[in-house]
């Protein structure tokens, strides 16, 4: 079809025909999913007035795509058929795979907005229609040639206005696509003749409003090796011998109980056993048999063990002597040449499982040590929970966190930390849902499990450690529990259906709800309560001050979800009115889960809703008013996951500045947006399932990104009042002006001015601060600037005399924060 450009709007020549002839009231609409991609691009459409000439609509748009099952591989739409019911509603049914008869079902009124999908094991379970009705509709499928390809689908006669709406959407989407894909690479052309801007900014004190003091927090998920091998300071990999091929769905033959372990030397062997385990939750252990002393059982750590000279490390293990008399073990850390850098001795091993340990003092710094367990005589010995921790964990906690990583998080000054995910919270299938009770108590009694991101979770970093970390850094804990359903992208794992898999059976929901109520009691109850006692026994008699709990994570807002969410929500509300429940509104800033999530939350009066979106930098530029339009009387917003994504997924100055622009909008809307957290937080180099992330690291280094510093600038310079400001621009260049953003907030002592310049030219800002009584103390000015594609940039802090800020020159591509001491309260 030929496109013409009229007054900046794309007009399809097919429609121009209508302008000349009398348009028909109805047209033919053909709907199909192409077999060329097994329906992955979703439901496609073509329309015609004569059933001969077919014009495709929105081929790249995917008006509706299958959201069933695993990302990518399973989201197929096979043999869809679309038909209209007596009340005008359109129904679409398709098969989920070519061979198992399972179907998906959704509805729409206008082909533009579709209801969340439901999935059934067979079409007979789709109670709304009888099998003969379904058969009759399916049999109407026919073949048509669209753009030279034979496609099979359904033909319907529809009002012309319906198709016009679809074509309009196609145009709007194409325009949005173009706009939201703008990036700084084209700035040299886009802004070739742009002169530096001047903006005068006049805060309007009378319009100030209260904003949330919890606006910037952190989102921790065990993704990208964030926990084991990351924040959790354990240096031994697979300490519990519980790695299993299923962690990676059998795709890595070396991923098993022996992963990261090997034998060195002769006369020594080891195998994995599971009779009489140290704990039923920890089934596997190593049996080490020595027939000629000298050999060792070796652990390579997480690609090497990094240790520092002069520091002490706590070695521990559970052991049981199976045969042999003198149970002496030499414990050694050896560098990459085999030279010992620390040694210790374990004795007194008994015939029953016993925890024992030794302190290893390291004499030489190395990044790449290995741990060796060397039996000193012939013996057969069972070993489990073989562990090595630095004594210098964050705040010296036992079973603690890696100090440098934890400090980097603490330095963000997050007002809260959300954990344990993300998708990890609701899991890959019902059996993989994260259950907090499996992650507290003695380490050997915790239940390790497969991580949905394709590795292993020891649960060593469990709920106690999360809560303790929050307390240690003054952040509120924000646990997120599954809403009784696993991730909508789950595999089937033996269930007839993947996806949400029908959710936790209703008969088990009572127990599941109790588990959530127990969590609240565990966190906040006195040691006299059943679960408060468990917390106290772990060393924390004082309550943990839990105030918020998330229920669900960007779930499909299906009936299965709704019925379970409502049960959990009602129970928490009834038993713990003091806890603020946060519901969920899907993975995007629009679409069926977003719409239905909001509708449902309003219906139940859920106090807060978790939104997620990963979008282009330009989306942030062109959606600065996203929350300006939000209803102030409904649920509050927790923007639980967001980040700017560019092709190639870097975390660079461009993405960071786009996020800074968004943060100014969040501050402006801090009366309705209560919390936000960039996602994900941590990523170990070489083990990323997701990019970009906020902090990258390896075994020895922590590498905060540019985006990290933006988050830090906003969290460290937060206020409790937002002051609107009137901006007058030197020029009427909307594209340029939209790339400058500001926010003015204050607290009792300080005024904070945040200025973002996502332009290739400098911007001069003339702030009019006459309504504030500014102290003579130096103003702290922090600037992040450089090339938009630069990574790992660090902000530069300087001080300025209050008079110097009469005119501020913001460098090209920069974010500037001014912290201004106030002398007196704001004049009214
Ligand atoms: O942040 C990474 C993932 O993105 C989260 O696990 C999930 O909630 C979202 O899809």
Image (tube, rainbow, N blue to C red):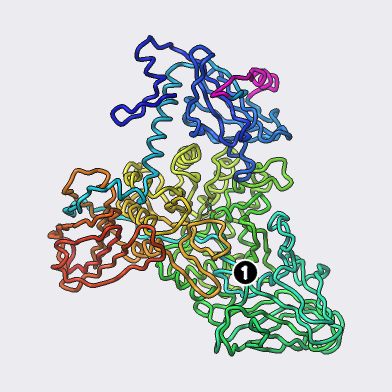
List the residue tagged with mark 1: 460
Residue appearing at x 47%, y 44% in the figure? 588
Q: Is residue 56 above or below residue 779?
A: above
Label 1 environment density (alpha carbons within 10 Å; few <14, some 14–19, many ≥20): many
Comparing 137 with 582, the one in front is: 137
Is residue 528 in view from this perspective? no
**Viewport quadrant of the C terminus:** bottom left
Left/right placement of residue 59 relative to residue 538 reads left
Q: Quadrant of residue 453?
A: bottom right
Lateral position of residue 348 relative to residue 177, left or right? right
- Residue at x 70% of width, y 22% of height: 131
Question: Where residue 738 sits in the image (x, y, percent)?
Answer: 28, 47
Residue 393, horizontal then vertical, whole percent? 53, 78
Residue 368 seen in render: yes
Residue 319 lies, with reference to residue 800, above or below; the image says: below
Does 147 lie within the magenta span? yes
Where residue 746 sits, quadrant-wise, is bottom left
Give whichever of 193, 552 is nearer the camera. 193
In the image, the segment drawn in magenta is 129-148
Residue sitting at 57 percent across and 30 percent down? Answer: 106
Give percent across and percent down for residue 692. Answer: 48, 57
* 120 part of magenta stretch: no
Q: Position of residue 629 (x, y in %)?
A: 33, 41
For the N terminus, the image quarter is: top left
Pick the front one: 828 or 41: 41
Q: Is residue 86 above or below residue 602?
A: above
Badge 1 marks a residue whose secondary structure is loop
Q: How many marks?
A: 1
Q: Nearer the viewer, residue 632 or 185?
A: 185
């Amino acid at each position: 079809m030929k496109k013409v450009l009229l007054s900046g709007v794309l007009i399809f020549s097919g429609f121009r025909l209508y302008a000349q002839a009398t348009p028909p009231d109805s047209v033919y609409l053909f709907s199909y999913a192409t077999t060329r991609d097994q329906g992955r691009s979703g439901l496609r459409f073509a329309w015609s007035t004569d059933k001969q000439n077919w014009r495709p609509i929105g081929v790249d748009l995917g008006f509706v795509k299958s959201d069933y099952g695993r990302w990518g591989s399973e989201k197929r739409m096979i043999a869809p058929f679309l038909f209209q019911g007596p009340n005008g509603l359109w129904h679409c049914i398709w098969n989920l795979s070519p061979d198992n008869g399972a179907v998906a079902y959704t509805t729409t009124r206008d082909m533009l907005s579709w209801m969340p999908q439901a999935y059934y094991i067979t079409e007979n379970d789709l109670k709304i229609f009888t099998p003969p009705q379904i058969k009759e509709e399916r049999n109407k499928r026919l073949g048509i040639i669209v753009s030279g390809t034979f496609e099979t689908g359904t033909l319907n006669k529809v009002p012309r206005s319906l198709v016009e709406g679809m074509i309009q959407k196609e145009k709007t989407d194409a325009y949005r696509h173009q706009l939201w894909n703008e990036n700084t690479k084209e700035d040299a052309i886009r802004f070739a003749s742009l002169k530096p801007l001047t903006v005068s900014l006049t805060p309007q004190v009378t319009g100030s409003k209260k904003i949330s003091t919890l606006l910037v927090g952190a989102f921790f998920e065990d993704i990208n090796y964030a926990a084991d091998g990351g924040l959790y300071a354990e240096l031994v990999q697979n300490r519990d011998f519980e790695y299993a091929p299923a962690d990676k769905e059998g795709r890595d033959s070396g991923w098993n109980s022996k992963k990261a372990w090997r034998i060195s030397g002769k006369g020594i062997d080891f195998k994995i056993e599971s009779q009489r385990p140290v704990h039923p939750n920890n089934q596997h252990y190593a049996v080490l048999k020595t027939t000629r002393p000298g050999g060792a059982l070796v652990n390579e750590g997480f690609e090497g063990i990094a240790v520092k000279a002069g520091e002490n490390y706590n070695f521990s293990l559970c052991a049981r002597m199976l045969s042999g008399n003198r149970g002496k073990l030499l414990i050694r850390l050896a560098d990459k040449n085999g030279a010992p850098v620390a040694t210790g001795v374990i004795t007194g091993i008994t015939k029953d499982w016993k925890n024992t340990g030794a302190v290893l003092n390291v004499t030489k710094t190395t990044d790449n040590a290995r741990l060796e367990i060397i039996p000193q005589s012939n013996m057969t010995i069972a070993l489990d929970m073989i562990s090595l921790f630095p004594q210098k964990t964050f705040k010296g906690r036992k079973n603690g966190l890696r100090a440098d990583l934890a400090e980097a998080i603490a330095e963000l000054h997050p007002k809260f930390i959300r954990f344990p995910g993300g998708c990890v919270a609701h899991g890959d299938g019902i059996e993989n849902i994260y259950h907090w009770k499996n992650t507290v108590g003695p380490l050997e009694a915790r239940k390790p499990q497969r991580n949905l991101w394709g590795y292993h979770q020891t649960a060593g970093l469990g709920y106690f450690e999360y809560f303790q970390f929050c307390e240690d850094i003054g952040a509120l804990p924000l646990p997120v529990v599954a809403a009784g359903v696993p991730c909508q992208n789950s595999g089937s794992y033996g269930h007839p259906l993947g996806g949400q898999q029908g959710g936790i059976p209703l008969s088990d929901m009572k127990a599941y709800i109790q588990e959530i109520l127990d969590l609240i009691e565990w966190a906040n109850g006195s040691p006299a309560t059943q679960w408060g006692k468990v917390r106290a026994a772990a060393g924390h008699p004082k309550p943990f001050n839990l105030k918020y709990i998330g229920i669900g994570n960007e779930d499909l807002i299906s009936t299965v979800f709704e019925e379970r969410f409502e049960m959990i929500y009602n129970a928490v509300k009834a038993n713990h009115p003091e806890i603020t429940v946060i519901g969920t509104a899907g993975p995007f800033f629009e679409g069926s889960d977003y719409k239905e999530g909001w509708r449902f939350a309003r219906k139940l009066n859920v106090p807060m809703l978790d939104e997620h979106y990963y979008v282009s930098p330009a989306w942030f530029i062109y959606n600065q008013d996203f929350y300006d339009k939000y209803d102030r009387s409904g649920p509050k917003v927790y923007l639980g996951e967001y980040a700017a994504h560019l092709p190639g997924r870097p975390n660079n100055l461009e993405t960071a500045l786009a996020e800074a622009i968004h943060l100014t909008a969040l501050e402006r809307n801090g009366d309705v947006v209560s919390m936000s957290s960039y996602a994900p937080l941590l990523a170990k180099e070489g083990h990323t399932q997701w990019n970009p992330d906020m902090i990258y690291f390896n075994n020895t280094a922590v590498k905060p990104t540019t985006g990290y510093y933006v988050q830090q600038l906003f969290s460290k310079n937060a206020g409790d009042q937002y002051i609107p400001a009137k901006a007058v621009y030197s020029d009427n260049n909307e594209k340029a002006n939209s790339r400058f953003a500001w926010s003015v907030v204050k607290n009792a002592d300080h005024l904070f001015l945040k200025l973002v310049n996502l332009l290739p030219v400098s911007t001069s800002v003339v702030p009019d601060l006459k309504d504030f009584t500014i102290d003579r103390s130096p103003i702290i000015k922090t600037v992040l600037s450089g090339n938009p594609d630069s990574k790992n940039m660090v902000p530069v802090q300087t001080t300025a005399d209050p008079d110097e800020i009469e005119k501020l020159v913001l460098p090209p591509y920069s974010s500037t924060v001014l912290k201004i001491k106030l002398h007196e309260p704001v004049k009214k």
